[in-house]
Amino acid sequence: MSTSKEVTASRRTFLGQASIVGAAAMLGLSRSARAELPPETKKIRLVHAPAICLAPQYIAEEFLRLEGFEEVEYARDWKGYPARAIEEGRADFTQDAAPSLLPAVDSGAPVVALSGVHAGCYELFATNRIQSVRELKGKTVAVSTMGSPEQMLLMSMLAYVGVDPNKEVRWITGPTGIESTTLFLEGKADAVMAFAPQPHDLRAKKVGHVIVNTAVDQPWSQYFCCMFVGQRDFVARYPVATKRALRAFLKAADVCARDPKGAARLLVDRGFEPRYEVALEVLNELPYRRWREANPEDTLRFYALRLHEVGMIKSEPNKLIAQGTNWRFLNELKRELKA
């Protein structure tokens, strides 16, 4: 016999799925989408990462099936930033932070940015005696791994205020790459760049304070954090599948903005985040409709200039943008999905 908890969980799962499926049915396929050829491949591989801000690529599963993809897989157990799964040949698409995408393109990785998604994933926590990014000069900062998205973002911030992140900051990591906030909590680091849902946990423990919130503090709030990224060969070989996949992702981003409660419920019931209230907090705070308004190329140019200043990338911004972006599908979908 089912327990009351099992019944409640089953009902919650049904409601979450019904909410997203209902949104998928309501949004459906546009006239232009129905006129397109079917995707050249029926299988698509995404990334499962421990970050709620990637919600659109989890919510997108229902939309991807509407677009003709019969197999939707999520790569797990990879190390580093999400696009690393693409580099390893284990995924076709993912969301990843713009600052970490640039070094990947610079090194020749087979990744290409297709769209921006939203801003605001990261909050910079510091001890109470530190009040600004400039005051991190000479201090110790914890990151998940060297070269991680949060390190690239913070390096950009440091360069922006005149601090050399290579020489004037000490970087530390945990033994398995996931203990950056633990290092901060234990007093081994003066600051940590936390990404959702880590800020919620740090606030709950009342340790340190936020000196930069990328959702509200300029200039960081003006630029995309997460971008949709594809595997270069997949995008070149399967243009119809790429456009259909991107349309599914962008519709999923709209659902996160329009129905954060339903999206949060689905994230919990599918095992992407165990705590509903935390998932809902993140979805309510992040501007998931930003993809409709901002220019993703501006974001990449801004971060490319910062990272080039401190020697983290060798190529000039224009070269990186030329070889690491493809806005054709986004421009078409902006016109199609403007309503």
Image (cartoon, grey):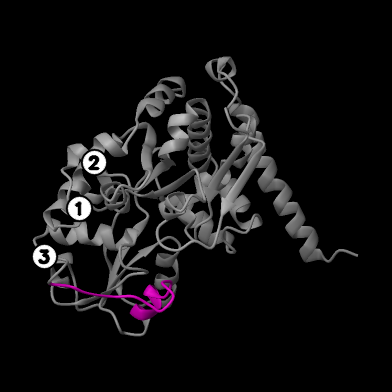
The magenta segment is 168-184
User: Label 3, on which residue?
Assistant: 163
Quadrant of the drawing holding the N terminus: bottom right
**Helix, strand or loop status at disc 3:** loop
Say if mark 1 contacts mark 2, CB within 8 Å: yes
**Helix, strand, or loop for circle 1?**
loop
The residue under the point 57% across, 19% down is: 37
Nearest-to-viewer mark from 1 and 3: 1
Height in image: 282 above or below 146? Answer: above
- Residue 53 in the image, given as x and y percentages of width and height: 45, 53
Where does residue 269 sit, x and y in percent of width and height? 66, 56
Q: Residue 133 in the image: x percent, y percent?
A: 18, 65
Q: Is residue 49 magenta?
A: no
Q: Residues within 10 Å of mark 3 (few under 14, many from 20)?
A: many
- Residue linked to disc 2: 320
**245 relative to 310 in the view: left or right:** right
Q: Quadrant of residue 209?
A: bottom left
From the image, tell me which residue sits under label 1. Answer: 313
Q: Quadrant of residue 38?
A: top right
- Disc tally is 3
Q: CA distance from mark 1 to mark 2?
A: 9 Å
* C-alpha gap between disc 2 and disc 3: 24 Å
Q: Which residue occupies 21% across, 61% down?
A: 155
46 sits to left or right of 328: right
Earlier residue among tags 2 and 3: 3
State the separation of the CA atoms marked 1 and 3: 17 Å
Residue type highlighted by circle 3: Val
| Residue at the right extreme, as displayed | 1
Cβ atoms at labels 2 and 3 below 8 Å apart? no
Mark 1 residue crowding within 10 angstroms, few (<14) / some (14–19) / many (20+): many
